[in-house]
Amino acid sequence: MTMKNLTLGRREFIRLGALTGLLSLSGCSYASNRATLVLPKDVLPREFLQSLPSSWRYQFLASSTEVKFNKNQLDKQIDLIALGDGWLSNCPYEHFQAIGDVTLYEELNSQAISFLNSFKADISARLLPLAVSPWVLIFRGGDRWLPKARESWEVLLESDLREQVILPSSPRVIMSLADRMRDTDSLRLLKLQARSFDDRNGLNWLLSGKAKVAVLPLHFCLKALASDPRLSIAFPKEGAPLNWTLLLRPKSTSQPLPSEWIKKSRELPLLLKLLARGVIPPVKYAYLKEGINSLPNRYQTIYQFEENFKNSWSLPPLNSLEKEALEDRWNNSSP
């Protein structure tokens, strides 16, 4: 059982290089008159990307490979970037312009507004929350734990789940879950429950029978419900950490923002397709209801309580002192 710490590692250096450069993505792959959206794989589902206007195309960013990026400027042919909030710690905001379309912010829910308010005003104006996905509990044969799991993350401390839990690879997410538990020693106890810290392969652990529950982003695991009746998902009533996907516009672009594409994601039929993939437009709950009510029953139970959304929380970027404090806390909680 291994676990990374909070220091800036290989993945973060790759992300920093990617965001401050992207020049390696230029050339023939962009030989098109169409505007270009760049994003890492798995940030947005295929259904969302395929609904882009015909005047737009998308290109995946190889975020986890040894791609060399120039650190001087953003590629002049990149018109829009979609990123998960984990990329924001080292984002070169000076290379981006304000989103500009205020109508896109008018329907945002309280969590999205709170997330934006955690940044300085000149930075938040350059960020547009496009989608959100909560961390959830996914069980294999977990009927006896579901009632408690639908209420609280405390279920992860159950004695019969000892070394049967797949926790996230992010110490910060784990600590935020421990903070919702009553026991003053909850972080150490939670780490003792872990079989592995491996959300990327969490489903594989479950399907192979090597774990009973995994903590995963909803968009990583919701689709699996349709193919395996042994699986069940709980979104606790006390809320969950949120994964944000955001749009940023490079200063080098003069392309108009595809506002209608963004607005369509908040309406049927595209809304239904996104909810079925665990990707939630960050709008007020009332705007989601029609889509939720159109989902299969197994999916509806995940989304049905507005309280779960209201109780959820974001994890905005940390400054260096905050990172150091969390790293100390993590290291001092070793079992």
Image (cartoon, rainbow, N blue to C red):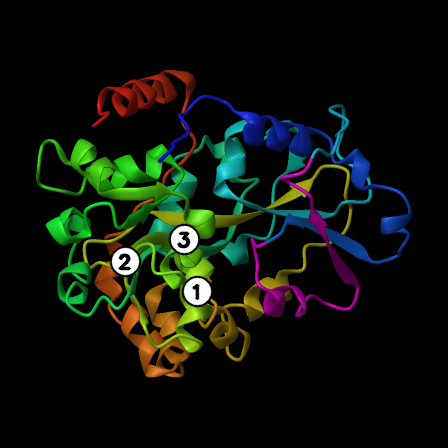
Residue 124, compared with residue 9, is above or below; it is below
Residue flagged by tag 1: what amino acid is it? Gly
The residues bearing labels 3 and 1 have C-alpha atoms spaced at a distance of 16 Å
Q: Which residues fall within the magenta stretch?
A: 42-65
What x and y, as percent, mark residue 246?
A: 54, 48
Q: Name the residue under label 3.
A: 202
> Is residue 18 shown in magenta?
no
Residue flagged by tag 3: what amino acid is it? Gly
Q: Residues within 10 Å of mark 2 (few under 14, many from 20)?
A: many
Q: Which of marks 3 and 1 is nearer the N terminus?
A: 3
- Count the numbered circles shown: 3
What x and y, as percent, mark residue 198?
A: 41, 44
> Is residue 53 shown in magenta?
yes
Q: Which of 4 and 276 is in front in this view?
A: 4
- Outermost residue toward the left? 183
Residue 306, compared with residue 22, is above or below; it is below
Q: Name the residue under label 1.
A: 278
